[in-house]
Image (cartoon, coloured by chain):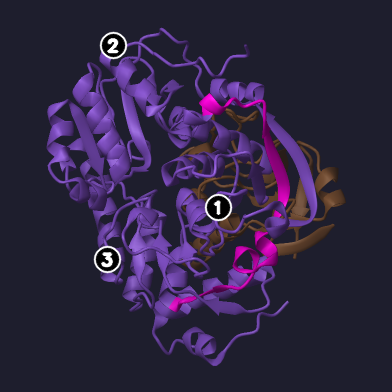
Amino acid sequence: MNEGWLVEGEARGRALVLEEPLSFWGGLDPTTGEIVEVSHPQRGEVVTGRVLVLPSGRGSSSSATVLAESIRLGTAPAAIGLSEPDEIIAMGALVAAELYGIVVPVIVFVQDGYASIQEGDNVILTP
Amino acid sequence: MTVELEDQDRALLDGEAGDGAALAMRLVVRMAEVARAPRLRDITRAHIDSCLYHGQVGLDFAERLLGGGATVAVPATLNVSSLDLLHPELVRLDDETRDRAKRLMDAYVAMGCRPTWTCAPYQLSDRPAFGEHVAWAESNAIVFANSVLGARTNRYGDFIDICAAVTGRVPDHGLHSDAGRRATVLLRLEDVPDALFDDELLYPVLGHVLGRRAGSDVAVIDGLPHDTSEDRLKAIGAAAASSGSVALFHAMGVTPEAPNLEAVAGDRVREGVITRADLRAARDELSRVPVGAEIGAVSVGTPHASEEQLHRLSALVLESRPRVPFYVNTGRAQLAGVGVLADDLAAAGVTIVTDTCTYITPVLHGIDGPVMTDSGKWAWYAPSLLGFEVALGSLEDCVRSAATGVLIRDERHWEER
């Protein structure tokens, strides 16, 4: 079901499927893993340990740092699934892997695969 | 898919220029793989956003590069930081965060970047020319470089920006190519009265709609006045890069790549219209404070105010002085450029913030009530980042409101007649 790994790795977790794109910067509190973007429909959800499925990133180029910082702090998702490649999200995960050796896999699902994942599904990713 | 590398790229990967440059090149190549770019290409300059402190990871990365001997291979400017080095007392950070933020800034300067500390590098005298390939970070700077200057940059973010500067190379794809710059969305302005184009508030609001409609696609807007100023285009781009991931928009008859529709439209174009009702709804989405309500403060200059905007602000506040705290963010180069006018602004009670911005670091304090701004970007981010309610208005509206302490907005041209 995978179209491509942006960052390869193993992960498992319950799916948290976002209805709208999320800017990690300004939208995710890296100290708590909580979605804080005011106008986001899933504000208040905690991404920690979940397989975060979202259509794409949004907005600020600082999002890579916020994702990498949340990986450093252990508040990050277990993995991230996207409907299209996102270089900013991939970069955040790659830098955390380079600096700390913690791998949060990032994967782009083909359209059917993306749509087939439902909120709360148990998702297992293997390379 | 493998990326086609040149000898110089392989030399960097092999560590011939040190561990820092090798790490930078490794990440550039990984990004090329992610983007499915067939090869890398040269850039002539970079604008670095990674100097803004968002946590230990940024410092760890910069010091890893610096410790590995990395220096920039092309001229590089620096974005805003978390500190105001010219007015250090304004930023209310704890000592530990302040020290780390300063260490981060020092690391980038030590790698050879220019300490410009501005989110509007396009307002510096030396800016990219039409067609120049650059690696710019900071979403508003990216959209301005592409759209208004006709320079070519992808949406570079933290980490990749300095990697590009250190290697002088980026993945060759996307907005670096002719095909990637063609519009796939056409948005026509309809039922927008001429008088509304004279209202500064139109531009951030239009940008907000553009971001919502275009997402990460390239759009062309039809219907903007041919003489739309750079400050107005800046306001559109900054808002569009906040509510959406817009990295390039064309404005027909205004921006340099869009003399007409044929010049910019791709093979398939999704068409839409933007009406006055759409604009009003977008304005009210960003600005949830009713006209007449008390406001607690005003913050303008996101992105950093241009010299022209500082002149306008100065003339306005000398006429009606603010009675609530009033902040303007600008670059140190713009501040130097307006000379003694800075004293006029301070005398009128305006707090000038440089090197940083009021929405990314704690500057506003003791504010009782909503904060008014002329920036769609500030209005988008401040509720999440700072917890303020936000009112949006033109610069003129902001000054009039600050003078009375209640939200005043000229809404004549926004309502249906």
Residue identified by numbered label 3: B109
Q: Is residue B250 left or right of residue B98?
A: right
Q: Which residues are magenta?
A: B167-196
Image: A4 above or below B33: above
| Residue visible at 72% across and 42% down in the picture | A14
> Closer to us: mark 2 or mark 3?
2
Q: What amino acid is at disc 2?
A: Thr
In the foreground, B277 or A61: B277
> Closer to us: mark 1 or mark 3?
1
In the foreground, B245 or A11: B245
**In the figure, what tint was chain A given?**
brown
Contact between marks 2 and 3 (CB within 8 A): the answer is: no
Mark 1 belongs to chain: B
| Residue visible at 23% across and 25% down in the picture | B317
Indicate the position of residue B264 as horizontal and vertical percent values: 68, 57
Residue identified by numbered label 1: B255
Indicate whether residue B180 is drawn in magenta: yes
Indicate whether residue B172 is drawn in magenta: yes
Mark 3 belongs to chain: B
Secondary structure under tag 3 reads helix
- In the picture, the disc for residue B404 is 2
Q: Is the residue at mark 1 from the same chain as the one at mark 3?
A: yes
Is residue B69 shown to the viewer in this render?
A: yes
| Residue visible at 55% across and 49% down in the picture | B254
Q: Is the residue at mark 2 from the same chain as the one at mark 3?
A: yes
Q: What amino acid is at disc 1?
A: Thr
